[in-house]
Amino acid sequence: MATKQVLTEDHQRDLAQQPERLTAEEKDKGRRLAEDVPALWKAQSTTSRDRQTIARIMLDRVVITVIGETERTEVKCHTIEKAFFKLEALLRKAAERTVLGCGIA
């Protein structure tokens, strides 16, 4: 009998910790945001952690190529939708990284 009580209490705790279900309005807002990722990315309310999450969801692979024997690199980002964009960056210490240009292909 004690085992049943422990299981019931565990179950109640688990239910209390589950997130609330989204309302229809919240789901609609999420769909609209997903359709306009650039606006979501640029929004003042979007944090660095949010952008990292977006990138992890959308990127399939990233290919970095060092150009010759320089600090310059080409970064190709392939999305899950089979599109890709590329940019050039300099290899420097983390605090000094610079993006030189970005082109969408």
Image: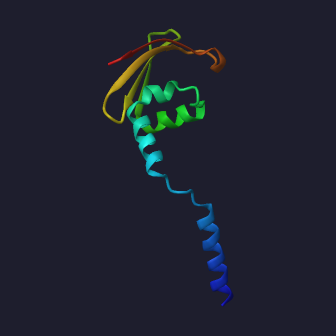
Q: Residue at x 40, y 41 (%)?
A: 31
**In this rendering, would 59 be left or right of 46?**
left
Position of 1 relative to 56 (above/below): below
Position of 7 relative to 40 (above/below): below
In the picture as drawn, the residue positioned furthest to the front comes out as: 25
* Numbered disc total: 0
Position of 66 relative to 78 (above/below): above
Residue placed most toward the observer, 71 or 94? 94
Q: Position of residue 42 (x, y in %)?
A: 51, 24
Q: Residue at x 44, y 25 (%)?
A: 38
Q: Position of residue 20 (x, y in %)?
A: 55, 57
Q: Residue at x 62, y 79 (%)?
A: 7
Which of the 4 image quarters holds residue 10? bottom right
Which of the 4 image quarters holds residue 81? top left
Q: Residue at x 66, y 90 (%)?
A: 1
Position of the C terminus, as image quadrant, is top left
Q: Position of residue 18 (x, y in %)?
A: 58, 60
Q: Position of residue 68 (x, y in %)?
A: 44, 10
